[in-house]
């Protein structure tokens, strides 16, 4: 049987360093190429030596697909393409292509200019890497090679985030990347075509064991905790990533400040507001309907109460709210501010998203009262709140996607093993399909049934839909025909039985059934014809009966039995018998002559 092979180089029972190797029908595809926020050594990037023994990756990989711009999904790209040598194509959406190089450059600056690394990718390497990118539009089917295509679907995680359907021959895999099934203030919910029925669904499971509480209740709690802190003279730090949740939370806080007339300053890392306006205006089609509708009259990202952050403001006395990058406190400005504010119990830090194990953010969420940062210990006296505004699907959302997509197999990545195990049991019980949760480096082999695709003439489909009867499901309509293969072309065809008989020089035989029914009154063929004409406008009235569906059904009078009617039908029209009997008001006659 055909097989699909999957090996996670990252995100296997872990969050971070997303990189999945997929082998399907002879094609090798890399799904995402991220870095790990929890490491600063060689473990931060996937181990690309696994591919081809550490040689040139171009000869092994047929395509690289990037689901969205977060660094844990794209942060290793320049290292992979320029330092490990990959010259092939990289596929991503238009917004992702615009934003990825900006975030990669920020990442490079932190590693080289702040941390002092020397063996790291350069700005030129980022530019060279991005030259290999092929843009993909939503729902666009991109033919990479003969019988090898990809198609992007809206993922709702961040601007430009996409799920990708990969088809190679008769095998298919849907990769979700990160996705969100709940719409928010600036993005819509994830959406794929229902009934895709891929052989394998590879889905993230960041919140596999969580069903989130009410979003409105969470937002009220968020605003209340911030207002209580600033009214008490404290400072609030909200670590965020450059694009995504920061826009959502800024819109929320902006409207709250406006409603209450508050004057406490709100700051955002310099460049974040400008970037948001630039990218959201450029890719307005990726936002939700409300943003699209109002963008011309009012730019939702032109904030009245939120100003760019000057580093000197951090040391100013008095209350303030600061949105600062990065979101996991693994470096950068947010970590520098944390080190200055964490000792004051008046202050508050709100962690609005998931933090990878090993980051300062994860340690703080876990309740650590002392943390080591750059060989120095810091006491954490400030209040810590973890309030998930992360745009990841929860357990309910993942189950909803599985229900809609109807995969044959499911694979969990981008999550913790214990949470995966919890959801695995629920999926297997509810949907009765296999679920896999490989660790990094573990190979999963999935057997898929052999499929044969043939074109069916539209006339044959129409004929089959007519035969099943007016009350039968058209969605599950059986189609009667014959498979034939040409000796010349070796092409498999599906044709009507009469055409197959003609090509083979054979005669067709048919099976006909007959049964007599009893009318309530004497049979009136003209009245019966008038009733049944809605089903066959071309029916023929004859002296001794009615001819329907090109003689596939005959309704005739019974000699010397004025109340009896005989119905004769071909086996193809079996489903029509009960309909016709009911329409003309006839009754079945039992063996003893009684009406049934």
Image (cartoon, rainbow, N blue to C red):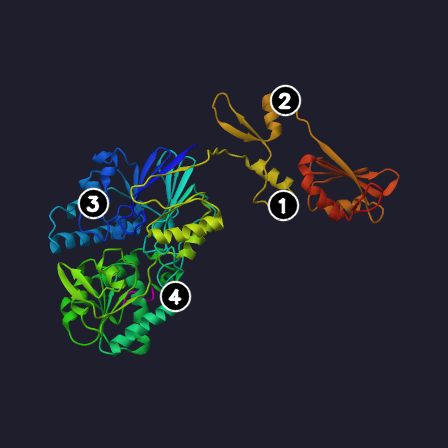
Q: Nearer the viewer, residue 426 or 33?
A: 426
Task: Give percent across and percent down for residue 94.
Answer: 30, 49
State the predominant SS element of the stretch in magenta. Answer: loop
- Looking at the rendered image, the disc whose residue lies closer to the viewer, 2 or 1, is 1
Residues drawn in magenta:
296-302
Task: Identify the residue under disc 1.
Answer: 472
Residue 360 in view (yes/no): yes
Q: Earlier in the sequence, mark 2 or mark 3?
A: 3
* Quarter residue 349 falls in: bottom left
- Mark 3, Cα crowd under 10 Å, few <14 / some 14-19 / many 20+, is many
Structural distance between the alpha carbons of marks 4 and 1: 43 Å
Structural distance between the alpha carbons of marks 2 and 4: 69 Å
Left or right: 552 with respect to 383? Answer: right
Element marked by disc 1: loop
Q: Tell me, yes or no, whether the two marked residues, 3 and 4, touch with CB atoms within 8 Å.
A: no
Residue 215 is tagged as 4
Task: Identify the residue under disc 3.
Answer: 78
- Looking at the rendered image, the disc whose residue lies closer to the viewer, 2 or 3, is 3
Q: Earlier in the sequence, mark 4 or mark 1?
A: 4
Residue 506 is tagged as 2
- Quadrant placement of the N terminus: top left
Q: Earlier in the sequence, mark 3 or mark 4?
A: 3
Q: Earlier in the sequence, mark 2 or mark 4?
A: 4
Q: Which residue shows up at 26% across the image and 33% down it?
A: 59
Q: Tell me, yes or no, whether the two marked residues, 2 and 1, touch with CB atoms within 8 Å.
A: no
Eyeballing the image, is 37 above or below 301?
above
């Amino acid at each position: 049987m055909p097989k699909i092979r999957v090996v996670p180089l990252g995100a296997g029972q872990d969050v971070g360093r997303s990189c999945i190797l997929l082998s399907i029908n002879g094609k090798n595809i890399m799904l995402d190429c991220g870095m790990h926020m929890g490491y600063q050594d060689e473990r931060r990037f996937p181990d690309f030596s696994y591919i081809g023994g550490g040689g040139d990756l171009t000869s092994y990989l047929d395509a690289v697909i990037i689901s969205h711009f977060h660094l844990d999904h794209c942060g290793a790209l320049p290292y992979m393409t320029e330092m490990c040598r990959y010259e092939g194509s990289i596929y991503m959406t238009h917004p992702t292509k615009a934003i990825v190089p900006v975030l990669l450059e920020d990442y490079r600056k932190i590693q080289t200019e702040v941390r002092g690394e020397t063996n790291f990718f350069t700005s030129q390497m980022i530019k060279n890497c991005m030259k290999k990118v092929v843009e993909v539009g939503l729902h666009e089917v991109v033919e990479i090679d003969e019988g090898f295509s990809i198609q992007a679907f809206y993922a709702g995680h961040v601007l430009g985030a996409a799920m990708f359907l990969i088809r190679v021959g008769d095998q298919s895999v849907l990769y979700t990347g990160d996705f969100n099934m709940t719409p928010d203030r600036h993005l819509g919910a994830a959406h794929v075509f229902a009934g895709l029925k891929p052989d394998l669904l590879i889905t993230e499971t960041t919140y596999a064991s969580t069903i989130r509480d009410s979003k409105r209740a969470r937002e009220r709690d968020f605003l209340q905790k911030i207002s209580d802190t600033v009214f008490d003279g404290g400072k609030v730090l909200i670590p965020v990533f450059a694009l995504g949740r920061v826009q959502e939370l800024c819109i929320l806080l902006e409207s709250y400040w406006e409603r209450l007339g508050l004057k406490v300053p709100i700051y955002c890392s310099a460049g974040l507001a400008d970037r948001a306006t630039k990218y959201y205006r450029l890719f307005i089609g990726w936002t939700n309907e409300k943003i699209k509708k109002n963008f011309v009259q009012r730019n939702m990202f032109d904030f009245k109460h939120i100003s760019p952050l000057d580093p000197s403001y951090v040391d100013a006395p008095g209350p303030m709210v600061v949105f600062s990058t990065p979101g996991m406190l693994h470096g950068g400005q947010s970590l520098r501010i944390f080190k200055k504010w964490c000792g004051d119990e008046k202050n508050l830090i709100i962690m609005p998203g998931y933090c990878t194990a090993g980051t300062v953010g994860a340690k703080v969420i876990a309740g650590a009262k002392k943390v080591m940062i750059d060989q120095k210990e810091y006491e954490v006296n400030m209040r810590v709140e973890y309030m998930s505004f992360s745009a990841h699907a929860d357990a309910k959302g993942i189950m909803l996607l599985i229900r809609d997509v109807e995969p044959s197999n499911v694979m969990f990545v981008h999550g913790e093993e214990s949470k995966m195990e919890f959801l695995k049991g629920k999926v297997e019980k509810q949907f009765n399909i296999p679920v896999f949760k490989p660790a990094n480096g573990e190979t999963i082999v999935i057997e898929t049934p052999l499929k044969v695709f043939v074109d069916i003439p539209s006339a044959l489909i129409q004929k089959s839909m007519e035969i099943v009867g007016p009350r039968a499901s058209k969605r599950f309509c059986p189609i009667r025909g014959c498979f034939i293969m040409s000796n010349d072309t070796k092409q498999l065809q599906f044709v009507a039985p009469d055409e197959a008989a003609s090509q083979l020089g054979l005669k067709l035989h048919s099976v006909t059934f007959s049964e007599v029914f009893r009318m309530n009154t004497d049979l009136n063929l003209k009245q019966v014809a008038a009733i049944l004409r809605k089903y066959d406008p071309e029916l023929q009235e004859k002296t001794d009966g009615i001819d329907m569906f090109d003689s596939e059904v005959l309704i005739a009078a019974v000699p010397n039995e004025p109340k009896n009617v005989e119905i004769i039908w071909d086996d193809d029209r079996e489903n029509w018998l009960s309909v016709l009997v009911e329409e003309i008001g006839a009754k079945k006659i039992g063996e003893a002559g009684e009406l049934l």
